[in-house]
């Protein structure tokens, strides 16, 4: 089995353009909207979505980041000394429509943990979910509202999202596990 590129830079940009438009349309504008990215890839994508919406709507949107390491239901199995990144939500979430952003959704466990973490910051009016790639295989009843691409890899394939902010290029690749 070889590595297969399923999205290149232009595909990712087009998907983020579409997701940004859908967010504005489904929320009937940007009033009370905020964007929160899940570390690590979701943070970069959240910033890009924020910039696209701000450019189109000529408005400043709050954007934050959240680390879900200690909210995971399996963190003790991963490591006795988990690496915790910084959560940065410098705005009130009360009565806000939060768009949670991640790079890939698989089982739904990361999203469940992120929702738990967000609730520690306040009670938003609603939480929507935007992902670049939906790889299926849910173990929890959590579905994204905004999807760049849906794929169905085998269980022994991994979906890797490469982003220029971290990997010096934009691509989504299927790799052997």
Image: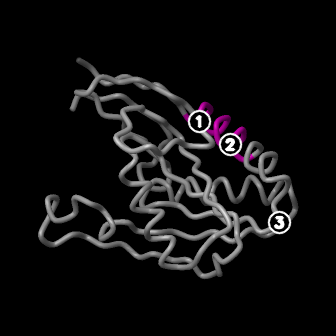
Q: Residue at 69%, 71% (x, y): give it.
A: 62
The colouring scheme, among rainbow, by chain, secondary structure or one colour, is one colour
Residue 31 bears which disc, if any?
A: 3
Quarter holding the C terminus is top left
**Residue under numbered circle 2:** 19
Pointer 3 local density, CA inside 10 Å: few below 14, some 14–19, many at least 20: few
The region drawn magenta spans 9-20
- Asked whether 27 or 153 is in front, the reply is 27
| Marks 2 and 1 close (CB-CB < 8 Å) | yes
Residue 148, which numbered label?
1
* 44 left or right, relative to 59: left
**Does the magenta-highlighted stretch encompass residue 69?**
no
Tally of numbered tags: 3
Measured from the top left, where is residue 174 in percent x and y? Answer: 35, 28
Q: Nearer the viewer, mark 2 or mark 3?
A: 3
Q: Dividing the image into 4 quarters, which one contains the N terminus?
A: top left
Q: Residue at x 38, y 40 (%)?
A: 106
Q: Is residue 54 left or right of residue 149?
A: right
Looking at the rendered image, the disc whose residue lies closer to the viewer, 3 or 1, is: 3
**Residue 26 image position (x, y, % from top left):** 77, 46
Examine the rendered structure and indicate whether residue 106 appears above or below residue 34. Answer: above
Q: Secondary structure at mark 2?
A: helix
Q: In the displayed image of the protein, which residue is found farthest to the right? A: 58
Quarter assignment of residue 39: bottom left
The alpha-carbon separation of the residues under discs 2 and 1 comes to: 7 Å
Residue 134 or residue 127, whichever sits in front:
127
Q: CA distance from mark 2 to mark 3?
A: 17 Å
Q: Which is nearer the eye, 133 or 118?
A: 118
- Image quadrant in which you'd find residue 63: bottom right
Q: Badge 1 local density, few (<14 within 10 Å), some, or many (20+)?
A: many
């Amino acid at each position: 089995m070889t590595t297969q590129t399923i999205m290149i830079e232009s595909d990712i940009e087009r998907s983020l353009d579409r997701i940004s438009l859908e967010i504005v349309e489904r929320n009937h504008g940007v009033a009370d909207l905020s964007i929160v990215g899940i570390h690590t890839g979701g943070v970069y994508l959240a910033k890009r979505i924020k910039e696209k919406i701000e450019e189109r709507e000529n408005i400043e949107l709050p954007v934050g980041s959240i680390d879900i390491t200690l909210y995971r239901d399996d963190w003790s199995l991963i490591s006795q000394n988990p690496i915790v990144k910084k959560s940065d939500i410098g705005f009130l979430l009360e009565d806000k429509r939060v768009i949670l952003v991640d790079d890939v959704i698989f089982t739904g466990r990361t999203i469940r943990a992120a929702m738990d973490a967000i609730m520690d910051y306040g009670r938003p009016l609603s939480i929507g979910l935007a992902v670049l790639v939906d790889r299926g295989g849910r173990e929890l009843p959590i579905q994204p509202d905004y999807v760049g691409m849906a794929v169905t890899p085998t269980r022994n394939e991994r979906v890797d999202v490469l982003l220029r902010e971290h990997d010096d290029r934009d691509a989504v690749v299927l790799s052997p596990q």
